[in-house]
Image (cartoon, helix red, strand yellow):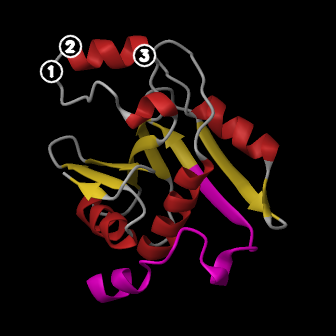
Amino acid sequence: MLTALAALALPLAPRAWAAAPRSLSFYHTHTGERLSVVYFEGGAYVPAALASLDALLRDFRTGDRHPMDARLFDTLHALALACGPGTFEIISGYRSPHTNAQLHARGSGVATNSLHLQGRAIDVRLTGRDTRTLRDAAIALGAGGVGYYAASDFVHVDTGRPRTW
């Protein structure tokens, strides 16, 4: 499996799918919301789809919204290509400064300057896939940070510099 994953360690906009439509499916574990959306079509991001993703990935504790980095969706799309189709289960998307400060104060491994605050990170699972497989695919992709939280059964991916924890 890792050989196949290593073959997918491509730039975020590989020529093979640069202009092809890109879609994602989500289930938000805290709100119960579902969304399946084509977020890239005709060689461009679809503004209405990005807006619906921003709404879905809002801070579910406060309702605050922030524009999400579209490269994050490209990373998830590449992971779905590597791991197989499925629905991404959202644990956390955007976090408001208030929420992030609360979580950090609890000592739950939340960074003070988390990329969640900038709409550049997401914590997910992929239905039907082991989170270790998702983690390995994300690391092989080399597109940003990858955190593996085995006890909570999710993977953090972000559009920051490549690093793992």
The vertical placement of 23 against 20, above or below, is: above
Dot 2 amino acid type? Ala
Dot 1 amino acid type? Gly
Q: How crowded is mark 3: few (under 14 residues within 10 Å), some or many (20 or more)?
A: some
Q: In this view, does 14 lie to the left or right of 104?
A: right
Magenta span: 1-25
- Whole-angstrom CA distance, mark 1 to mark 2, is 5 Å
Q: Is residue 23 magenta?
A: yes
Q: Is mark 1 on a helix, strand or loop?
A: loop
Query: Disc 3 marks which residue?
Result: 97
Label 1 or label 3, whichever lies nearer to me, is 3
Q: Which residue is drawn at 60% across and 33% down?
A: 56
Q: Residue at x 43, y 42 (%)?
A: 122
In the rendering, at what x and y percent does residue 117 appear? 45, 28
Query: Disc 2 marks which residue?
Result: 105
Quarter the N terminus occupies: bottom left
Whether residue 97 is visible to the viewer of this picture, yes or no, is: yes
Q: Residues within 10 Å of mark 2 (few under 14, many from 20)?
A: few
Q: Quadrant of residue 68?
A: top right
Dot 3 amino acid type? Pro
Q: Sequence order check: which comes first, mark 2 or mark 3?
A: 3
Q: What element carries label 2?
A: helix
- Whole-angstrom CA distance, mark 2 to mark 3, is 12 Å
Which residue is farthest right? 42
In the rendering, at what x and y percent does residue 147 appear? 26, 50
Query: Disc 1 marks which residue?
Result: 107
